[in-house]
Image (spheres, rainbow, N blue to C red):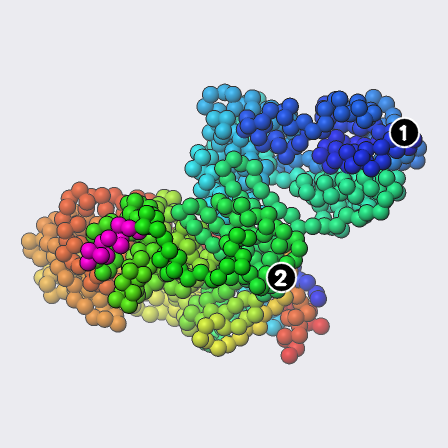
Amino acid sequence: MQKLVVIGAGMATGRALEHLLDTAPGAYDITLFNAEPRGNYNRIMLSPVLSGEKSYEEIVTHDADWYEENGITCRFGEKVVSIDRERKVVVGEQGEVAYDKLIFGTGSSPFIIPVPGHDLPGVVAYRDLEDTNAMIEAAGKPGARAVVIGGGLLGLEAAAGLRLRGMEVTVLHLMGHLMERQLDEAAGYLLKKDLESRGIEVRLEAATNEISGDGKVERVLLEDGTVLDADIVVMSVGIRPAIGLAKDAGLDCGRALKVDAQMQTSDPDIYALGECVEFDGNVFGLVAPLYDQAKVLAKTLAGEADAFVMKQLSTKLKVTGCDLFSAGDFAGGEGREDIVYRDPARGIYKRLVIEDDQLIGAVMYGDTADGNWFFGLIKDGTDISEMRETLIFGPAYQGGAAADPLSAVAALPPDAEICGCNGVCKGDITAAIEGGATDLGAIRAQTKASASCGTCTGLVEQVLSVALGDDFVMPTAQPVCGCTDLTHEDVRRLIKARELKSQPAVWQELGWTTPNGCHVCRPAVNFYLLADWPLEYRDDPQSRFVNERNHANIQKDGTYSVMPRMWGGMTDANELRAIADAADKYGATVKVTGGQRIDLLGVKKEDLPAIWADLNGAGMVSGHAYTKGLRTVKTCVGKDWCRFGTQDSTGLGIALEKRLWGSWTPHKVKLGVSGCPRNCAEATCKDIGIVCVDSGYQIGVGGAAGMDVKEVERLVDVKTEEEAIEWVVAFVQLYREHAKYLDRAYKWLGKVGLEWVQEVLADDAERAALVERFDLSQSVYQTDPWAERAEPEAARRFQPLADLTLEAAE
Amino acid sequence: MNWIDIGHIDDVPLRGARLVKTSAGCIAVFRTGKDEVFAASDTCPHKGGPLSEGIVHGQKVTCPLHNMVFDLNTGAAQGADEGQIPTYPVRLDGGRILLDGDALANRSAA
């Protein structure tokens, strides 16, 4: 009988032994080494053990009896020290064993990020029963906190298990969305939301700097300065094949131990399988290909012909209640088409990727029942052109007629729910229609359908259309852009009502048809998010037009103009000297503007950080002459100098500018403050204009002197400078919270009416609340963007990525 | 193919672009929301707008000057606009962005 030695009692070798004992019973005298002091158990079921849904005994696949019945000599808890290929012996810690055939099933080791403190007690990987038991033990302490580093398959299973055991859990993930190798952004977003609803905190783009503690883990420090308390840290950032032994034995290794399609290594008597092997450039982490390898290896050892081939893989997450499935290749690309189905209310998302009439990838979240059917289509390369229209609805819909949305609505029974927020059924709506309602407004007033979150508006309109036929004309509100059917007003309302705090949340929950918007909707959504959630959402420069991203105005020749702030139009000799020096140094043209400032034109992009640093050096900050935000406050000289001046108009202008600068608004905001009704600061054609009079301050709003010329309308008259500032700030905040992106104040006022604005602002409590919200936003956004970008790290981005003009041409 | 390493993908903002100067003119290197990279001429055929300053959405970019939209796969203008920008082979290798030098050489020789 030939002697077979197996190193590693894992899932792959376990399966291989089963097959071998089936196909060639008694052919080999088998010795099995395992470093863990136990035999083979189902490692992918550790998650249910961690969560308490299963016990260790339930996941054991081969117990002591099985090994004994099959005559396998077990050397568990004993490490293999080396292999002597000349003498064909395996050297274990307790002595040698000779082999005729040898199998490597050494698996992989967890990758541990070498941050300071990674070796503290309490830092565990999530690979074996020891790790799992350590985690279960840590969870036993009341109020214990866990930090899981890595938002991949295993890390999330660990997080969910620890949470089920009552721990406070934070997941840190370096990338922009969870499980980025298996999921696209939309599904990753849904998963994150799902986990958060289970009380798991998820931090994306979070880099760990250090783990610290006195003798054991106590906290985790992130790159952004955040400190997280932790009783246990689970590192689940990846694995690397365990090939030290194979390398020492002189076997041919690349990223892992190289094998051919018969699982044979460079030594004809040595075979390998599982996570330690490399086949055709691929390494393995999921169980399905490992089982295929086990089958091939068993046949090879039994003297039968077989060959391992790579197959498509699918993934499922083993977290009870989180249904997700992904298979194949779901990256977008040339010649690839997406079919996307979203049902945000039910948390369902499905995406199919099609190339050359074949399904090549599928991502599903929330409803994965058809996953295996899609996976079958991917594996078989089925031509799907015939069933394409109904493909995404799964196998149940194949062969049926194409659905007309109206007929679907017509077919709904009267008790079908249309409006989930207010519990309105189709029957309620048809009753209202029979009672004389003919449009959406009437339905809303009579039944409250679509009066809350508004997502059922389309359905209600379809019910109207079915009931009234040609008498009902679908309203044609202007959608934001081609990416959505929603209007700006709808989007703003839904962002507030549904507490959408990120761009993916908007794309997903509001059913955007594009992966990340377009140049029309993205700047608008970016503004709405930052205006409504100043602390939760951060401005995204990549969703800004060039001027707002580069903090300078691009000119027709690609150069930029640079305009420092001059508070209330006041400057001094030092500032002017610095501006003159900058003009010389960077070859800028100098222009005095209508907003009482000085513009430096013709500055090259590469020079922007340097000119900003120079101007910063003289105490000047960005004038935001390029933003949908506060531009200037134009003033006259006021009572300090002018014989007609009634108040300190310059002082008020400076105070307003210092309060408002840096804020983002739906469109640009220009202010003027004149010291008397002669109005030298032209305040009556500004977005907000104040005219000082003997008795106080007249505040006008909604002026313009551009494409349209408008005189301001009087908002209010107040007695003191403090009141004037309070009203102006409250007005700006109301505009920020309600206006459509790119509507100047006068356009917004034309829609909502001055009376409504006056009514809101006249309420002292409401006015104070608006001011408070504005100041909260300013605590984040009132910083000089120039100073930030003049720093070396940020300044680098203003240079070309590479200069290849010096590369020798052939 | 003559792949030239021009930088790391993290040097290009997500849904953004960076400029690469070459003897064939300025080239914009784009990074999409899904971490795909594309390379194309930086110059809009309409009025010469710098495409590396445009908003990147899906696999498209919008020119910052007058909103012409180009498909980064083909370089073709989208919608009603007509126009075409040259595209260049570019690929990722472990996070490094590699640009095909031969394609640049052909372009500058042409």
Q: Picture coordinates of residue A75 (x, y %)?
A: 79, 24
Residue A35 on the magenta segment: no
User: Mark 2: which amino acid?
Assistant: Asp
* Circle 1/circle 2 CB separation < 8 Å: no
Q: Residue at x 57, y 63 (%)?
A: A386
Image position of A396 (left or right of A104): left
In the image, is residue A24 above or below residue B52? above
Residue closest to the far left: A695
Q: Could you tell me which secondary element the residue under label 1 belongs to?
A: strand
Residue holding disc 1: A98
Residue A695 in picture, x, y percent from top left: 6, 53
Question: Pointer 1 indicates a residue of which chain?
Answer: A
* A263 over A649 or under it: above or below: above
Amino acid found under the numbered disc labelled 1: Ala
Q: Main secondary structure of the magenta part?
A: helix
Residue ID at (66%, 35%): A110
**Label 1 vs 2, first from the N-terminus:** 1
Magenta extent = A426-436
Mark 1 or 2: the one toward you: 2
The mark found on residue A383 in the picture is 2
User: Badge 2 sits on which subunit?
Assistant: A
Sort mark 2 into few (<14), some (14-19) or many (20+) by Cα contacts within 10 Å: some
Relative depth, front residue between A297 and A106:
A297
Q: Which quarter of the picture shows residue B107? A: bottom right
Residue A220 versus residue A605 in the image, above or below: above
User: Mark 1: few, some, or many residues within 10 Å (few <14, many ≥20)?
Assistant: some
Asked whether A432 falls inside the magenta stretch, the response is yes
Q: Locate residue A406 relative to residue A441 in the image: left or right.
A: right
Secondary structure beneath disc 2? loop
Q: Residue A785 in the image: x percent, y percent? A: 39, 53
For the point 60% across and 24% down, the residue is A55
| Residue A672, image quadrant | bottom left
